[in-house]
Amino acid sequence: MTTSAREIHLAARPKGWPTDETFRFVDTELPAPAPGQVLVRNTFMSVDPYMRGRMNDVKSYVPPFQLDQPLEGGAVGEVVESAVDGVSAGDLVLHNLGWRSHSLTSEFTPLKEVPGVSPSHFLGALGMPALTAYVGLLDIAQFKAGDTVFVSGAAGAVGSLVGQIARLKGAKRVVGSAGSAAKVDHLTGKLGFDAAFNYKDGDLREQLAAAAPEGIDVYFDNVGGDHLQAALDVLNRHGRIAACGSISAYNEKDLPPGPNNMHYFVTKRLSMRGFIILDHYDRLSAMIGEVGQWLSTGQLVAEETVAEGLDNAPAAFLGMLRGENTGKMVVRL
Amino acid sequence: MTTSAREIHLAARPKGWPTDETFRFVDTELPAPAPGQVLVRNTFMSVDPYMRGRMNDVKSYVPPFQLDQPLEGGAVGEVVESAVDGVSAGDLVLHNLGWRSHSLTSEFTPLKEVPGVSPSHFLGALGMPALTAYVGLLDIAQFKAGDTVFVSGAAGAVGSLVGQIARLKGAKRVVGSAGSAAKVDHLTGKLGFDAAFNYKDGDLREQLAAAAPEGIDVYFDNVGGDHLQAALDVLNRHGRIAACGSISAYNEKDLPPGPNNMHYFVTKRLSMRGFIILDHYDRLSAMIGEVGQWLSTGQLVAEETVAEGLDNAPAAFLGMLRGENTGKMVVRL
């Protein structure tokens, strides 16, 4: 017996911003699961910045998407049919074959529902963005209580969790940058940031220095470029940078100039470390344990922007790249 | 009873390169040592790149030199008169009040002569440059056997030791850059570097990639700027950078643009850490033990450029900044 499924394929590799020509909707029939596989009806899928990189045909930390094949990405769903011992129809699972209504896969993580928390959060506040925030702040940047933390892209899925985890772990001060006045209000009004600013409002370095008058100890970098330069200026001695992303450059055809104040690495004994969250899944259960508790008690706010239906996934992806989401962008299937 | 001494004072803060107007020779009389002090007749003094920074009136990791006061810097000498228990006339000591024939000081490190090794090496292959190389390579860059190491400024006091320590500790390949064909020959011919190139000979990235066809795992950065950019291009996954100095920028009035390939920090999981050797003197005895043995057995070559006489110290300092020395530049007093 087969199951009707709808998939989104990569129709063409975009140059710069993706367009309608980038995506193709394909209706197909999936066979019953082979031994070791489950058939999953997806209920939520994720759209994330790194997916733009996988649309290019270049060597990177994850292989590029293949032309005329389905796109991939985090998804949560309910097992429809199982050929895996110990997994039954109705079980909740997390896997990486999103961008389709149903997925056949042998690689998945069983999930336990957290009471009162939507399963979509396993794609956000309890999923990859949360693990990115948790590992980047605690392991990579070696955050400790009493640090002042600055995070760029602070209203995004990762950034909004970085700031809140820092607050809940005893930061002296949490500062965020974002791209609109509404996001800035959200950061200080709802997420408990001590200060936030709109990077479009004026000189980045001056705004950061004003928001963190005693300097910063940790910079969680989602943006790169001029944000990194401003952070290098304002970082205190022994300051630490977690390099998580360079969203500012993902759609640029020519690379912008780099920071010209790298000499601060020596004089201020700074350190910077880049990381890819795929290397750090050994920290998943620690993160779910700690962040899950904050979520269930309401100490941590997990905002989501939910797009409705697979047909809206390309628009949701583009909206996320343009920064139209607040918190994690997911698609309900 | 007083002792006649000759000192070199800071007469004016240089803009760009130091000139004759920067220095003033002053003859003076020193009193007998007060309790806790020793009077030292200096036999060797050091000239180092960081001294240029101390000539500026800016806050940095060490306070600026004071106008109309003696310059300071590493020196080795023989105690002439002691008011310290356990220290006698004739003892060898290391201290930081160089740029003068005699020094009165309460802050010094007693030294034991290493048989067959000139005491000047306590300013180089057994002193601050060696500690810089040792700590930067082993602690900051977390070197491990099998790594390919690239060091810029490789013919300098620090760089020549970085390469040799890496070789003696089991590097897979050691590559250095320098500013003349003679230095390049010295690196591969005498110091045991596997490859070296003259950065003035052509495209830095291409020369580095050719010298390290399987990439590099550690970059020991003495230079910054375009060297850092080339290293970021060629570093392997999980590569590590020890940021030791930016000699290329020390005399520039406008900062050159920074590397535009900082996104490699994320995709290649790179890390970079700056350090100041003053923070790491707890590692001095470990370094002297290990490097001292290599020196005494001839496994490690410690080149020196020796200038003669205090009157030649300013010229030696400028020559060092211009890269005219091979190995450590010292002045014999």
Image: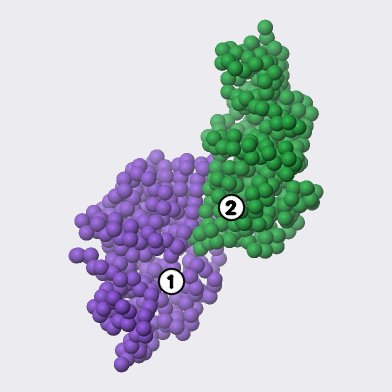
Chain colours: A green, B purple
Q: Is residue A289 left or right of residue B262?
A: right
The residue lying toward the viewer, choosing from B20 and A224, is A224
Tell whether label 2 touches label 1 (CB within 8 Å).
no
Within 10 Å of disc 2 (Cα), the crowding (few <14, some 14-19, many 20+) is some
| C-alpha span from label 1 to label 2 | 34 Å
Determine which residue is flagged by label 1: B51
Above or below B136: residue B278 = below
Q: Is residue A324 left or right of residue B133?
A: right
- Where's residue B84, x and y in %? 32, 79
Above or below A82: residue A143 = below
The kind of residue tagged 1 is: Met
- Where's residue A55, x and y in %? 62, 32
The residue lying toward the viewer, choosing from A241 and A194, is A194
Q: Is residue A146 visible?
A: yes
x 43%, y 71%: residue: B51
The quarter holding residue B74 reads bottom left
> What is the quadrant of the C terminus of chain A in the image?
top right
Comparing labels 1 and 2, the label whose residue is closer to the camera: 2
Q: Which mark is residue A144?
A: 2
Within 10 Å of disc 1 (Cα), the crowding (few <14, some 14-19, many 20+) is some
x 46%, y 45%: residue: B239
